[in-house]
Image (spheres, grey):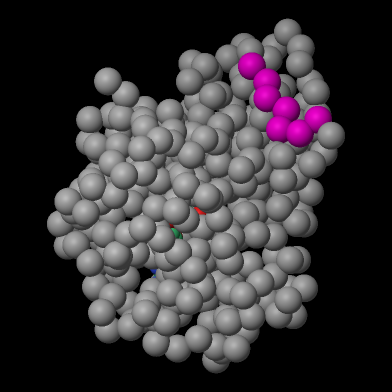
C-alpha cells in the first residue's frame, strides 16, 4: 500500500508518536520529526544517512513563534521575517537553550523558517511542537519535489508522506545567517538574492563550495543524480565529446533535439527562471531514470533564480 496520504490527522498522530512524516513545502519535501524528541531526530539522521555534524532546519507556523526558538533577532532579521515569511527563506539565529544540540549539531545558532504551504502550515498550527525537517532525500541525492520521489527513496523506512502535490518553487530555501547583525547568504535558493537586497541592502554571499563551518551542509558535490552530469555554457561542443553514448540534455530554453540525443528536457521554453527552478529536480529525477550514460546541463544566466539554479547544477555536476 502507498504511504502517500492527504490525512493531516494521521500525520499528527504519527508525529506525536515520535515517528517521521515527509511533509510538503513550497521548496522541496522535508522529512519531519518533533524537534523535542531525541528518538525522532535520531531517526531523521539515520533514515537519511546524514552525518550528525549537519544541522537541521526548524519549521514553525508563524513569525510569532520565532521568539520561542531563538534568543536574539537582529533588526534586519526581523525585517526579512516580516517581509518573506511564510516563504522560502531560512534564518540562522542565536538559539534558545531549549533547542536540542542534536538539531543544531552543537552550534549556538539554529536555522528556522515558516514554510509557505497550506497543508504544512495547517499541520504546524495543530501541533504542540515545531518540526525539524531536512529535505526528504538520502544524503547527497536530489531533493524530492513530488510525494512519489519521497516514496521512491524511503518506501519502507517511513510511515507516511503527507501529500501536498508538487512543490511550487522546487529548490531549497535561501539560508541567511548574521554576522555583527548583518545578513550573510549561506545558501542560495528559492528566494532570489535581488529580492533580499531590495529589503536589506547589499548582502555578502558565503555560499562556499568547500565545507564551510558556517553552513556545514554546503558540500561541493550534493543534489546529485547518479548519472554522470556535466555543466556547460556550450551545449553543442559538450555533446561532441560524448558522441556514441546515451546522452540526456537539460536546458533552460535551447531546443537541440537531434539523432545523437536520447532524451531532452527544456526547463522553460519561454525563458521563465521561476518555471525552470520549479521543474529542475523533477527533470533531474526523470533523466536519472532513463538509463543514460551522461547528462549534459546548460548553465543559466547568472542573476535572479538563475544564480541559485547554477549553484545546484554546479553541485550536481562535473563542470567542463
Ligand atoms: O527548503 C528547505 O530549506 C528544505 C525544506 C524541507 O524546508 N529543507 C532543507 O533542509 O533544505 P536541509 O537539511 O536539506 O538543508 C539545511 C541546510 C544544511 O545545509 C545545514 O547545514 C544548514 O541548513 N543549517 C542548518 N542549521 C544551521 C546552522 N545553525 N548554521 C548554519 N547552517 C545551518
Ligand atoms: Mg538537503
**In the rendered view, would you say 189 is above or below 137?**
below
Q: Is residue 319 above or below residue 262?
A: below
Classify 89 as above or below 142.
Answer: below
Depth check: give the residue in front, 297 or 8. Answer: 8
Horizontal relation, residue 232 to residue 229: left or right: right
Is residue 125 in sight in this rendering? yes
In the rendering, at what x and y percent does residue 156 appear?
A: 22, 30
Q: Residue at x 62, y 75 (%)?
A: 82
Asked whether, in this view, residue 178 is left or right of residue 232, the answer is: left
Specify start and end residues of the magenta stretch as a single range.
263-269
| Left or right of 240, for residue 134 | left
Horizontal arrangement in the rendering, residue 57 relative to residue 84 (left or right): left
The mark tally for this picture is 0
The C terminus: image quadrant: top right
Q: In what quadrant of the picture does the N terminus appear?
A: top left
Residue drawn at (52%, 17%) of the image: 290
Residue lying at the far bottom in this picture: please name it.
180
Identity of the residue drawn at 69% across and 70% down: 196
User: What x and y, as percent, mark residue 97?
Assistant: 27, 84
- The reply to whether residue 140 is in sight is no
The image quarter in which residue 2 lies: top left
Q: Is residue 158 magenta?
A: no
Residue 78 drawn at (x, y percent): 58, 82
Quarter of the displayed picture in which ligand 1 can be seen = bottom left
Q: Position of residue 137 (x, y in %)?
A: 38, 41
Residue at image position (57%, 81%) is 77
Residue 201, quarter of the rendered image: bottom right
Residue found farthest to the right: 270
Amino acid at each position: 500500500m502507498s504511504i502517500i496520504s492527504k490525512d493531516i490527522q494521521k500525520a499528527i498522530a504519527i508525529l506525536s508518536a515520535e515517528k517521521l512524516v515527509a511533509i510538503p513545502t513550497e521548496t522541496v519535501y522535508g522529512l519531519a520529526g518533533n524537534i523535542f524528541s531525541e528518538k525522532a531526530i535520531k531517526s531523521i539522521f539515520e533514515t537519511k544517512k546524514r552525518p550528525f555534524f549537519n544541522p537541521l532546519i526548524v519549521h514553525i507556523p508563524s513569525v510569532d513563534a520565532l521568539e520561542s526558538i531563538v534568543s536574539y533577532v537582529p533588526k534586519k532579521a526581523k525585517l526579512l521575517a516580516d517581509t518573506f515569511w511564510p516563504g522560502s527563506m531560512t534564518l540562522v539565529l542565536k538559539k534558545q537553550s531549549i533547542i536540542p544540540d542534536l538539531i543544531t549539531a552543537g552550534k549556538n545558532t539554529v536555522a528556522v523558517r515558516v514554510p509557505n504551504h497550506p497543508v504544512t502550515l495547517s499541520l504546524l498550527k495543530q501541533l504542540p511542537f515545531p518540526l525539524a525537517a531536512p529535505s526528504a532525500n538520502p544524503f547527497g541525492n536530489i531533493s524530492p519535489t513530488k510525494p512519489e520521489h519521497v516514496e521512491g527513496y524511503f518506501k519502507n523506512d517511513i510511515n507516511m508522506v503527507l501529500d501536498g502535490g508538487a512543490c511550487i518553487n522546487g529548490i531549497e530555501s535561501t539560508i541567511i545567517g548574521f554576522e555583527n547583525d548583518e545578513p550573510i547568504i549561506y545558501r542560495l535558493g528559492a528566494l532570489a538574492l535581488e529580492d533580499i537586497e531590495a529589503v536589506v541592502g547589499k548582502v555578502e554571499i558565503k555560499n562556499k563550495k568547500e565545507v564551510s563551518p558556517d553552513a556545514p551542509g554546503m558540500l561541493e558535490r550534493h543534489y546529485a543524480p547518479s548519472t554522470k552530469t556535466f555543466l556547460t555554457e556550450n551545449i553543442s561542443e559538450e555533446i561532441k565529446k560524448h558522441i556514441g553514448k546515451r546522452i540526456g540534455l537539460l536546458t533552460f530554453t535551447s531546443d537541440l533535439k537531434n539523432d545523437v540525443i536520447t532524451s531532452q528536457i527544456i526547463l522553460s521554453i519561454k525563458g521563465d527562471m521561476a518555471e525552470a527552478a520549479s521543474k529542475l529536480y523533477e527533470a533531474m529525477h526523470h533523466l536519472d531514470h532513463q538509463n543514460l550514460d551522461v547528462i549534459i546541463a546548460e548553465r543559466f544566466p547568472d542573476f535572479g533564480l538563475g544564480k541559485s539554479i547554477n549553484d545546484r547544477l554546479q553541485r550536481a555536476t562535473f563542470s567542463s
